[in-house]
Amino acid sequence: MNLLDLIRARQSDRAFDVSRPIELEKLERILEAGRLAPSACNAQPWKFIVVNDPELKNKVADCTSNRVLGMNHFTKQAPVHILIVEERANFTSTIGSLVKKKEFPQIDVGIAAAHICLAAKAEGIGSCIIGWFDEKKLRPLLGIPSSKRILLDIILGYSTQPLREKQRKSAEEVISYNKY
């Protein structure tokens, strides 16, 4: 499968085969893709916390769902959660963020998350990036210092969902050449 086909096939999966764990060698390749992601000034401002212990994974999943709003009830089905914690960037990336008024570490985490999700799809594993979670409950659960921010939770599992047609804006709406 070429890269564009892989991108077309990747989707946010919200239903997983609960009886099928992710093989360690596949998980390690997925994490390696995230580790190798580019970052501003090579700062690599991330730490990936892999949660694959079933009991702990369920506690993490509880922190991602909200009964009142009906959010993320599917996260317990996923056998793996990868929480991405923002780490301090190196000096040059930090200065660049201040001068250019851009949050380079957050951009970098987004790039790493995309690498993880595409690598998962290449391994035949579904993923969903979760941004809605109770960070205050997650920190003590995983031993994350209060000075750190958890930016994302990427859930992984063997999807039971069919491939959906992507609903995207047309190329003409989002692409221009040589001017806005």
Image (cartoon, rainbow, N blue to C red):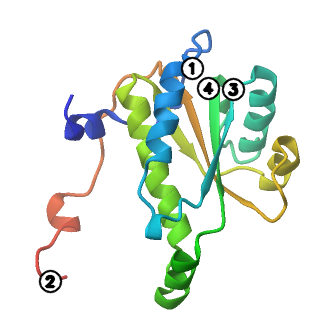
Q: Earlier in the sequence, mark 2 or mark 4?
A: 4
Q: Nearer the viewer, residue 122 or 69?
A: 122
Q: Position of residue 106 (x, y in %)?
A: 54, 65
Can you identify the residue that label 3 sits on?
A: 52
User: Label 4, label 1: how many angstroms apart (C-alpha)?
Assistant: 15 Å
Can you identify the residue that label 2 sits on?
A: 179
Which image quarter: residue 39? bottom left
Q: Nearer the viewer, residue 111 or 63?
A: 111
Can you identify the residue that label 1 sits on?
A: 24
Can you identify the residue that label 4 sits on?
A: 78
36 sits to left or right of 51? left
* 1 or 2: mark nearer the eye: 1
Q: Earlier in the sequence, mark 1 or mark 3?
A: 1
Q: Is residue 160 above or below residue 112?
A: above
User: Label 1, label 2: how many angstroms apart (C-alpha)?
Assistant: 47 Å
Q: Secondary structure at mark 1?
A: helix
151 sits to left or right of 161? right
